[in-house]
């Protein structure tokens, strides 16, 4: 948002004053466009690198503020979660070796972060769209960065929602849960690219950024896992929107749009229409005492305004392609901020994504200047949604033709990007190197998302969900440090987990989460079949209210069988189940859980969270 201190709008007077400032900002913006005050024919690239912090066991670390102090570099800043930080890279003119410079600076700054993290707490940093080891219990208010602007935003959005936030994402697996804060938004870690554009081309280039978003996302996806669920190729897209969706479910039939989104329509007249549409569609939700500028008065004095109120409002909207306004040395400029590219999987991959996107933006064919005459906006938005769900397996509608993501990227877009980069006179070796990384992903059918998914599935054959998440994260860290692009990474294997310390610090790390339960009124013969079919030794028993009332074990079943290995006909589960149910939480240490099993004389423990069964722990799961 650009403001350190923000506050809720608590009176009509505050609301009216902010809106007056916004309207003056838009008026000044249009005047600057008309009078040609914007910087022209100058193109720059910049970026923001978000990253996660993990401890020596590759689980989230909440030492962001201590690490930030140790880094002591103004390029770094906080993020919403205490397990994240952000780097603001310097802008570079789009010419010759600009991408090599961007790469060099990113390497140097990330090395600073690595060194500081190790010094503070033997922590590490990870570049990933969503950290696989993040758990629901990590995403609580206490782990939100204790800065006023974050906590104010959380309160405002929660008050607007008037109910719990909900997540429902269906991919290969399914995730449905409720949460009380906006901290799930902090799961999203991105590599945001800024492109300074010419105001005379702004309408065409902004529209074009929307058109290419789907295909670019498909080749760059890196976020398939969330809370141990395999969801979308780029799960961040759904997660970000839903994690701060303030629309009340009662009113979802209304035309209110979520504050995170792709956009609504093509821009056909003035680039100012982007801001006008935002003001028309989205109510102002916060203000700041720092807003004192009357933009039109500043212009009359020859001072280029900062457009404080408009920028504040723009900062509460999270478009995947966001129009940004800035001022440097009393000269205004326009930027398009690409917000959908995920962090990682390596620095080389991130710079390759940047080069590819910039090349496409600058290589836009002239016949697409008035794109609204050629293609429906729904195609662009549909392509984006398809890419988020299925990544490189997507099919796109591209100017009334159907293309697979692979064919469109190889046959149409990479050659187009190459032309755009040559037009900028980028060094040929950089063009070939970074576009070669994109081409190699196609050749090897490997994006970050595909590597994570393959590794995760391979690991799940031999280890628990939690351990698979840890090993994937550890493998990702070590491969990132090697500097090799993801297309050349070997999939993660279970042997890579042998050197990870404290993997088994609690019951939640090893418990069985593929759960089956039976009703107390189920026939015992059915229960016996379920244990055989699913190879289960312990079955929780619930009543009609879904409360745990007992447990059935194979030992109980074996004792009931007659000489013909048959169970009594008509017997119900409640007649024979054990009512000695011992419960622990997922935070219970392995040592304590083992002691409970011995002390209570039971074979298994039911793992509960908020009165809900989340797992089963038994002796066989105790690590050697």
Image (cartoon, rainbow, N blue to C red):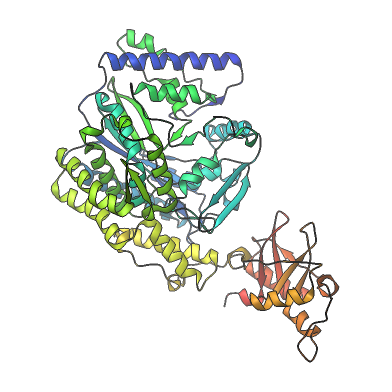
In this orientation, which residue lies closer to the viewer: 371 or 24? 371
- Residue at x 55% of width, y 17% of height: 15
Is 273 drawn above or below residue 83 in the view shown? above
**What number of labels is visible?**
0
Is 94 drawn above or below residue 464 in the view shown? above
Is residue 419 found left or right of 170 in the rendered image? Answer: left
In the rendered image, residue 146, in percent from the top left (x then y), is placed at 55, 38
In this orientation, which residue lies closer to the viewer: 230 or 293? 230
In the rendered image, residue 515, in percent from the top left (x then y), is placed at 65, 66
- Residue at x 51% of width, y 74% of height: 462
In this orientation, which residue lies closer to the viewer: 120 or 26? 26
Is residue 216 found left or right of 503 in the rendered image? Answer: left
Dividing the picture into quadrants, the one containing residue 548 is bottom right
Say if residue 90 shows up in the picture. Answer: no
In the rendered image, residue 245, in percent from the top left (x then y), is placed at 55, 37
Q: Quadrant of the C terminus?
A: bottom right
């Amino acid at each position: 948002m650009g403001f350190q201190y923000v506050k809720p709008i608590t009176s009509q007077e505050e609301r009216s004053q902010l809106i007056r400032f916004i309207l003056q900002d838009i008026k000044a913006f249009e005047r600057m466009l008309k009078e040609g005050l914007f910087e022209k024919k100058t193109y720059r690239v910049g970026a923001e690198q978000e990253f996660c912090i993990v401890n020596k066991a590759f689980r989230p670390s909440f030492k962001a503020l201590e690490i930030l102090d140790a880094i002591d570099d103004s390029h770094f800043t906080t993020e919403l979660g205490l397990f994240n930080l952000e780097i603001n890279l310097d802008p570079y003119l789009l010419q010759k070796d600009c991408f090599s410079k961007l790469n060099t600076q990113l390497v140097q700054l990330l090395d600073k972060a690595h060194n500081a993290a190790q010094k503070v707490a033997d922590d590490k940093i990870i570049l990933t769209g969503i950290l696989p080891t993040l758990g629901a219990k990590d995403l609580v208010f206490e782990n939100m960065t204790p800065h006023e602007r974050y906590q104010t935003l959380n309160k405002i959005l929660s008050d607007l929602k008037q109910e719990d936030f909900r997540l429902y994402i269906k991919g290969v697996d399914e995730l449905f849960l409720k949460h009380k804060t906006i901290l799930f938004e902090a799961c999203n870690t991105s590599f945001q690219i800024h492109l300074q554009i010419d105001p005379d081309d702004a309408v065409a280039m902004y529209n074009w950024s929307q058109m290419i978003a789907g295909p670019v996302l498909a080749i760059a996806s890196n976020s398939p896992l969330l809370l141990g669920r395999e969801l979308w190729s780029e799960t961040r897209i759904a997660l970000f929107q839903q994690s701060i969706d303030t629309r009340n479910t009662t009113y979802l039939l209304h035309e209110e749009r979520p504050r995170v989104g792709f956009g609504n329509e093509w821009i056909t007249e003035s680039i100012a229409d982007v801001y006008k549409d935002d003001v028309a569609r989205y109510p102002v939700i916060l203000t700041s005492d720092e807003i004192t500028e009357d933009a039109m008065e500043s212009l009359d004095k020859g001072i280029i305004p900062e457009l404080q109120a408009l920028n504040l409002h723009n900062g509460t909207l999270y478009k995947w392609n966001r129009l940004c306004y800035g001022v440097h040395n009393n000269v205004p400029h326009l930027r398009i901020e690409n917000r959908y590219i995920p962090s990682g999987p390596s620095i080389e991959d991130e710079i390759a994504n940047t080069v590819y996107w910039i090349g496409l933006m600058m290589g836009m064919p002239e016949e697409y200047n008035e794109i609204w005459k050629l293609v429906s906006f729904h195609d662009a938005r549909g392509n984006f949604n398809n890419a988020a769900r299925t990544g490189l397996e997507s099919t796109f509608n591209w100017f009334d033709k159907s293309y697979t993501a692979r064919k469109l990227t190889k046959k149409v877009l990479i050659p187009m990007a190459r032309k755009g980069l040559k037009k900028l006179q980028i060094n040929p070796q950089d063009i070939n190197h970074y576009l070669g990384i994109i081409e190699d992903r196609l050749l090897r059918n490997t994006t970050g998302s595909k590597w994570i998914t393959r590794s995760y599935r391979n690991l799940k054959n031999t280890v628990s969900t939690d351990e698979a998440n840890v090993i994937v994260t550890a493998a990702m860290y070590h491969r990132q440090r090697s500097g090799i692009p993801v297309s050349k990474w070997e999939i993660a294997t279970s042997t890579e987990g042998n050197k990870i310390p404290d993997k088994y610090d609690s019951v939640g790390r090893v418990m069985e989460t593929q759960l089956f339960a039976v009703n107390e009124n189920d026939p015992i013969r059915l229960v016996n079949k379920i244990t055989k079919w699913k190879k289960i030794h312990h079955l929780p028993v619930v009543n009609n209210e879904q409360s745990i009332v007992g447990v059935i074990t194979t030992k109980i079943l074996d004792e009931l069988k007659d000489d013909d290995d048959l169970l009594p006909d008509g017997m119900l589960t409640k007649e024979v189940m054990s009512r000695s149910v011992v419960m622990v939480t997922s935070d219970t240490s392995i040592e304590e859980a083992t002691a409970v099993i011995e002390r209570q004389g039971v074979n298994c423990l039911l793992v509960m969270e908020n009165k809900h069964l989340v797992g089963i722990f038994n002796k066989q799961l105790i690590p050697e």
